[in-house]
Amino acid sequence: MTDPKSTEIQLADYAPFSHLIDGVHLTFHLSPKATRVESRIAFRPNPAAKPVSEMFLHGEGLTTLSSTIDGSPVTLTPADQGVLLSVPEGPFSFEAEVQINPAANTALEGLYMSNGMYCTQCEAEGFRRITWYPDRPDVMATFSVRVEGDLPVLLSNGNPGESGPGWAEWHDPWPKPAYLFALVAGDLVAETDRITTCENRDVTLNIWTRPDDAGKATYAMDALKRSMTWDEQAYGRAYDLDVFNVVAIDDFNMGAMENKGLNIFNASYVLASQQTATDVDYQWIESIIAHEYFHNWTGNRITCRDWFQLCLKEGLTVFRDQQFSADMRSAAVKRIEDVLKLRARQFTEDAGPLAHPVRPESFIEINNFYTATVYEKGAEVIRMLHRLVGADDYKKALDLYFERHDGDAATIEDWLQVFEDSTGRDLTQFKRWYSQAGTPRLTFTDDFKDGIYTATFEQETRPTPGQPNKDPQVIPIAMGLLGPNGAEVAETRILEMTETRQSFTFEGLGARPIPSILRGFSAPVILDRKIDAAERAFLLAHDTDPFNKWEAGRALSRETLMALAADGTAPSAAYLDGLMTVASDASLDPAFRALVLRLPSEDDIAQGLFDAGRTPDPLTIHRAAETLRQTIAEHLKPALPALLAAARVDGPYSPDAKSAGQRSLFLTLLSFAARLDDGASAALVYDEADNMTLKQGGLAILLGIGSGADQLVAFHDEWQNDRLVMDKWLSLQASLSEPEQAAEVVAALTEHPLFDWKNPNRFRALIGSFSGNAAAFHRADGAGYDLLANWLIRLDPVNPQTTARMTTAFQNWRRYDADRQGMMRAALQRILATPNLSGDTSEMVTRLLDG
Ligand code: ARG
Ligand code: ZN
C-alpha cells in the first residue's frame, strides 16, 4: 500500500487531465486472494490540457504483472498516490495486468469480498485499488468488461453481452467516470420485473440477494418501479439501458451506490418483510432506492468535474428523493422529518469544529466530505432556489441543465448558470450558500401601526473554522399572518431577504396579527424569536401551515424541557393542554400527531442550553426528559385508552404511509401508557405483534422504562439467525440502556458471537448507537469516551472510512464542562497518537481538535 494521504487538495488548483479516453476494456480473473485485472485503455491527448511527455495514473496496493504502451513494455515510476509513465505524443493504447487481493480488503473500497461474494465500491477513489487509471470524475469513458470466475452470477455495468459458464461480458455505452464502475460476482438470486419506459425501451429490472434472503426484495422492487415512473413524470427523465441491476451486500460502508446500471446497496436498505422490517425501514428503502435511481441522471449522465462539486449531484439528488417521498407519502410529514434530520445532523455539524461549506474548498480525504452539509444542506439550497424561482421556472432551468450538460462533468457554476440563463435572475449573492459555512441566525421584531404590520429581520452567521467573517445571504422567508381569532389574514408571501437588516410590510390589517414565519421551513436558518408559551400554543392550535403548526409545538416542548433541565421549572398547563388537544384531534393526520407528541432529543436540548449560555449536563437532561414524559403521561391518562383504541391498526399489515402513520401514533401513545402500568400494555403489544414495527416499538418502550429483560431474551432467541434484525437488538440496548450501565452493557455485547465488528452495520448498530445515547456516552467518569476511542483505534486499520465517520460523535466536545472537555480531548489525542493511523481518521481528529 502507498502511504496515507496527507496533502490537502484545493478547489482553486483544478486542471484538466492530460489525456482523454476513447475506451476501456477490462478483464477480471476472479480469485479471492489473487484476482488478476487486465486493462486496455485507449488514450489520446486532451486538447484542453497542456501537452505532456509523462502521464500520471492513480493506483494503490496494486501488484503490476505487466504494462505496455502500444505493445512495448513501459516503466511505471512511483509517484504520490500513483505512477508516472512516459507517453508518446499522439494517441496510444496502454495495457496493464495487475494483481489484487479482494479477500484481504477490509476497508471495503475497491474490489472486496462479502460473504463469499465479490463486489466493488469505487466512489470516491476506490477504482485506483483495482487498476492503474486516471481516477478522477472528469475523465469519462465507455467500459467493456469481461468477468471470469467460478460463480453463478457475474455482473458489471451497462448491458449484458455474451456469456457462458464461468464468464460474462458487459458493455456500458454511456461514458462514465471510474467511480461509477461496478462488478459483482456471487451466488445470488433475483427478484425480477420489467417496465417499458416512456421512450418505449423495455427494461429488465433485477434485485439480487443471497438465496436465503429470497422474497425480501419485493418492496424495493415496487419502490424502484415507482421511482422510474416518477422521474419520467416529474423531470422527464427516462432510464437509458436494457437492464437495471440492484444488489444487496452485507458489508458496505454507506447506504448505497449509484453505479451505472448496477446499483449496490447495503442489504439493510433493500431487504424487508413484515416480520423483519419496521415501517421506518420501509420508508428508508423507498427513499434510498429512489435516490440511487435518480442519480442515473443527476450524477451519472451529468457528473461532477471534481470532488469539490459533490453537492452538484448529492444535494440535487437528495432534493429529488425528498420530492419523490413527499409525493408518495404525506408532504407535510415528510418535510417535518427532513427538517428534524437537518437540524440534528447538519445544524450540529455547522455549529462545531467540522463546519464546512456546501462546496468545500479544500480537503485531504474526500470520503470525509460525504456529510450532512453536502447532502442535506445541499438539498436545502436547491429547495430555496425552487422556492425563489417557482416550480415552473425550476422545471425550465432543469430542462436546460439536462439539455446543456448531458454527458458533462459539471460544476456549481454550470448549475447556477442554467438558472440565470433560463430565469434572468442574478444569483451572485445566492451563490454564497455554496461557499459560506455556518447556519444563519435570523432575529425577528415587529411593529403594528395604522393597519400596517412591519416585520423586521436581522441575519447573522457566526464564524466557522477558516471563515471569520460572513456576508449576508439571500434568505427566502415564507410568511403568513393570522388574525386574533385564528383565521389567516395574509396568505403566505415569500419575503426575499438580501440585507443584514431588512423590513417588510403588510397593509390593510384591522388588528395586530400573529405572524407565522418561515413556513415550510423555507430556509435552513435558526429563527431566534422569543415568544411566550401562549403565542406558541396559539400557533399550535391555529397555524394553517402544517410545518409551522408542528414547529410551534416543537418549540414549546423544547423550551419546556430546557427549563425543566436548567432549573426544574415545571411544564405549563398551556403546554400540556396543547399536547392533549393535538393528541385528541382526529382531524389531524396521525403521523403528524405523533410528531407533535415526540419530545426533542437530549442532544437538541444540550445544544439549546449551550446556545443560551449554560453548560449542559447530559444526565440532568436525561432525567428531565424522563420526568417530562411521566408528566405528559399523567396528563394524557384519562384520554389514553380511547386514543389507543382509535389508533390501533386493524387488518393485515401493510407498510403504506397511512397505516405506518397510525402505528407511529399508536406507539407514541403506548409509550405514555406504559409509564402508567409498569409496561404491561407495551408487553402485551410486544407479545401480540405480527410485525417488526410493533415488536421493536414495544421492546423499545419497555427498555425506555428500565424493563423488558425477558423480551430481550425472547427477541434474541427468535431472531438470532437474522443479522439485520439482530442489529436492532444490539442497537436498542446500546441506545436505551440506563446511562450508568450502558457502557458495561455494550462492552459485554461486544463479546457476543453475533458482534462481527468488522461488519460496518454491526459496528454502527452497537458502537454507533452507544455514542448516540447522550447521557451514557457523556458519563461523568469518561467511560463512554474511552469505550468509543478504544473501538475506533481498533477499527481504524481495518476500515478507515467507517472509523473516520464515527469520530463525529466527538464533534460537540466544546459544549460541555471543563472535565468532560478534557476527557474528550484526551480521547481524541489518544486516537491521533495511534501508530499508523489512517489519513481519513487523522484528518477528522485534527479538525475536531483544532476547529
Ligand atoms: N454516492 C453515494 C450516494 O449518495 C454515496 C457514496 C459514498 N461513498 C463514499 N466514499 N463516501 O448515494
Ligand atoms: Zn447520493
Image (cartoon, helix red, strand yellow):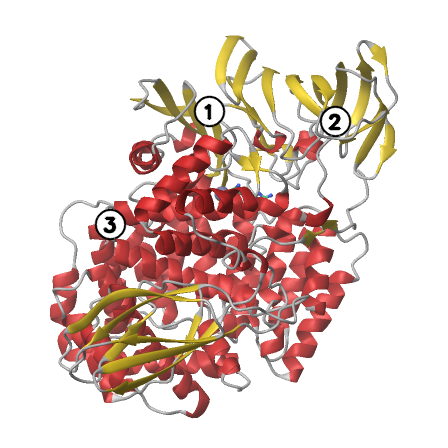
In the rendered structure, the answer to whether residue 514 lies left or right of residue 715 reads left
Q: Is residue 767 above or below residue 626?
A: above
Residue with the mark numbered 3: 657
Badge 2, how many Cα within 10 Å: few under 14, some, many 20+?
many
Looking at the image, tell me whether mark 1 or mark 2 is earlier in sequence order.
2
Secondary structure beneath label 1:
loop
Say which of 617 and 369 sits in front.
369
Residue 545 appears in which quarter of the rendering? bottom left
Q: Which residue is painted at 25% across and 53% down in the image?
A: 330
Q: From this viewpoint, is residue 215 visible?
A: yes
Marks 3 and 1, how far apart in space? 31 Å
Marks 2 and 3, how far apart in space? 47 Å
Nearest-to-viewer mark from 1 and 2: 2
Q: Which residue is painted at 56% across and 23% down in the image?
A: 175
Residue type of the residue flagged with mark 1: Leu
Say which of 473 and 737 sits in front.
473
Residue type of the residue flagged with mark 2: Trp
**Residue 97 x, y percent position in the rendering:** 76, 18
- Marks 2,3: beta carbons within 8 A: no
Please state, as top left, top right, bottom left or bottom right, where the N terminus lies in the image.
Answer: top right
Marks 1 and 2, how far apart in space? 30 Å
Badge 1, how many Cα within 10 Å: few under 14, some, many 20+?
many
Say which of 674 and 34 sits in front.
34
Q: Which residue is painted at 50% across and 60% down in the image?
A: 769
Badge 3, how many Cα within 10 Å: few under 14, some, many 20+?
some
Residue with the mark numbered 1: 188
Nearest-to-viewer mark from 2 and 3: 2
| Residue 132 image label | 2
Ligand 1 lies in which image quarter?
top right
Looking at the image, tell me whether mark 2 or mark 3 is earlier in sequence order.
2
